[in-house]
Amino acid sequence: MRYRIEKDSLGKKQIPAEAYYGIGAFRSKDTFQITKHGLCRQMIKALSVIKKSAVKANADLKLINPDVAEAISLSCDEIINGRLHGQFITDVIQGGSGASMNTNANEVIANRANEMLGGEKGKYNFVHPTKDVNLGQNTGDVILLAGKITTIRLTKKLLTEAKKLYNAYFEKIGEYGLSKDIALTLGQELASFAHALERDMKRIDTALGGLHEIRLSYTREDRQIDDEFIEKSIKYLSMYSGENFYQTKNIYDNGRNLDAITWISSALKIMSSNLAKAASDLVLIAQEGKITIPQKIEETTSPVVIETVQQVSYYIMGNDLTISRSVEGGELDGNIFYPIIFACMFEIINLLRRASRIFREKVIEVLIVNQL
């Protein structure tokens, strides 16, 4: 393997010659070998959306060379479309408020942009990671914003899956012509699961609204330039993300109080708890002889999918507690725990989406009604 030499304030490092990441990301990977899991794809795309929005704003204000801005924008587009994700090598859990994630993004985008302009990886002779790609941005703001964008996107996928489960309850009721009106009937029991899920979805959708309030800090001496940059960045951010973001009225408050994050985490926890409760109740209904849950794995009739859903709920409760404690652990308007907050958040959403899917496919859609 061929290598190139890169240098920073800590010294020199050998970097694979073909790598788009640089010495900052390389040092982070070497230091934070915790989970051995990298960033999720939506987080990588979110970072690129932020970088593209910022460079467009800087270009409008004539704060960056137009050719450089165009190359950076095209590099971001490639990443948004799924390229170069393997070049994001930092561990999902890391120190420094997630600064290494931001550095990784800056380096990959800068090296790809340099390549487009005829430069060499690691030289940054046309595009610099911090002076160009990160121009006008605060690292903490970038990570917090990327986490919010990712949470919104992943949660929307979850809500789509939850809607399928909601429909499956009523399809099962319709399949057997079950009554939903008389107390203690099987139809009403299944309808109650659907109604609880509907409340969960509404609760989560409402909580998502709080994530659209964001903060972009002032990073330059010229306050007027920063005001224009923030306004334009948010305009482009909303355009490229498809979400209606807006600048908070109080920058300090938005960084200090992450209640919007604990709100969505709590709403997701409630959904997981209600899902596990529905699973447990189905076991009781099956014991009454009303239904049969066809489950066979390794010659056992144990309701293994239901057991899985229950375990997911316990797992999510632990993650929600970690998020709550990490939000509480922030200092003033900063928080060094962004990595674990969002690692837990993304895990909650993905686990709940998958649990909802297998519960629908392996339990609700195939359960057999024995008595009407």
Image (cartoon, rainbow, N blue to C red):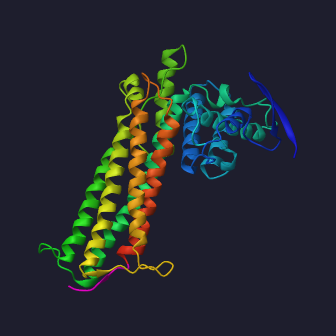
Of the 4 image quadrants, the one containing the C terminus is bottom left
Which residue does the image show at 34% across and 61% down from the upper left? 276
Magenta run includes residue 369: yes
Tell which residue pokes out farthest to the right in this image: 2
Asked whether residue 208 appears in the rendered view, the answer is no
The residue located at (38%, 70%) in the rendering is: 360
Residue 259 x, y percent position in the rendering: 35, 35
Q: State the residue lying farthest toward the top.
A: 221
- In which quadrant of the rendered view does residue 250 lie? top left
* Residue found at x 21% / y 76%: 186
Report the side of 150 relative to 278 (left or right). Answer: right
Figure check: 126 above or below 285:
above
Question: Residue 191 at what x, y percent from top left?
Answer: 23, 69
**Tally of marks:** 0
Residue furthest left in the image: 182
From the top left corner, tell me how far across and down residue 49 is, in percent: 55, 41
Is 307 placed left or right of 197 in the picture? right
Which SS does the magenta portion mostly show? Answer: loop
- Residue toward you, 135 or 272: 272
**Closer-to-camera residue (293/163):** 293
174 vs 300, left or right, is left
Quarter of image, res 359 = bottom left
Judge whether 357 appears above or below 260 on screen: below
Q: Could one spot residue 153 in this view of the protein? A: yes
- Report the magenta residues as a range: 366-372
What percent of the width, then of the height, locates residue 152? Answer: 43, 47
30 within the magenta span: no
Give the residue displayed 33% in from the left and 45% down from the top. Answer: 207
